[in-house]
Image (tube, helix red, strand yellow):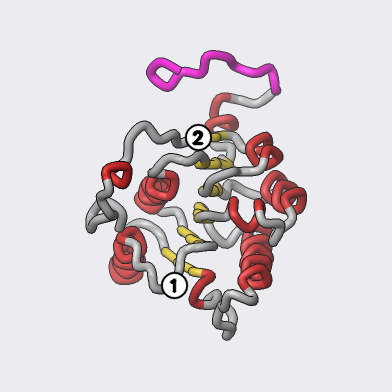
Amino acid sequence: MPKGVPANVPDDGLTTRQRRNAPVLAVHTGPGKGKSTAAFGMALRAWNQGFDIGVFQFVKSAKWKVGEEAAFRALGRLHEDTGEGGSVQWHKMGEGWSWTRKHGTEEDHAAAALEGWHEISRRLRAEEHGFYVLDEFTYPLKWGWVDVDEVVEVLTSRPGRQHVVITGRDAPPALMDAADLVTEMTKIKHPMDAGRKGQRGIEW
């Protein structure tokens, strides 16, 4: 796609504008680093366009403070104070979804993941956000906590112009088939290969 020009234009009866404005379902998968980072970069662009942002983290511990969370919460406050950008909601399964009073434990992770998906499904039907990040959502799908076919049906039939990006290793084939954009992160080298632990500003 040199200079952003599609190599092929489908004979689908749509105008260039209609294709350009179609909602995108993106999947970032693979063993390499950067899947979530790329998703949050997309969310940053969406925030700048005034889209309401909904972030749902499915696996990371509630105690794990990622830098993107602090940055997006600050952007959410900026929107509340000035109207700039879009609103931001950030939810983490490990601390209990913010719309419930439950606190996640090892025993009820599967139920919590399913509950989170049901809330996301409700929000999609209500067109509650313009841009969704379902971070590490491939794992509940892989482990059978959430039904893949149901997820694909909900995502492919979502109304309006809601963009969704899903991250995590081992994305199921049905999800990748349904996606408009699939990126596989491959690892060539990593500092941990040389015994170096994660560090501030790079991993969090």
Can you see residue 135?
Answer: yes
The residue depicted at 66 percent of the width and 68 percent of the height is 110
Q: On the image, which quarter does residue 188 sit in? A: top left
Q: Amino acid at mark 2?
A: Thr
Mark 2 or mark 1: name the one nearer the start of the chain: 1
The residue depicted at 56 percent of the width and 77 percent of the height is 104
As drawn, 112 above or below 138? below
Q: Of all residues shown, which one is farthest toward the left?
A: 200
Q: Of all residues shown, which one is farthest toward the bottom?
A: 101
Between 47 and 91, the one lying in front of the other is 91
Residue 41 percent coordinates (x, y): 37, 46
Q: Which residues are magenta?
A: 1-12
On whether residue 7 falls in the magenta region, the answer is yes
The residue depicted at 58 percent of the width and 42 percent of the height is 25
Where the C terminus falls, by quadrant?
Answer: bottom left
Where the N terminus falls, by quadrant?
Answer: top left
Q: CA distance from mark 2 to mark 1?
A: 27 Å
Q: Secondary structure at mark 2?
A: strand
Residue 27 vs residue 76: left or right? Answer: right
Can you see residue 83?
Answer: no
Q: Residue 62 — which label?
A: 1
Between 45 and 171, the one lying in front of the other is 171
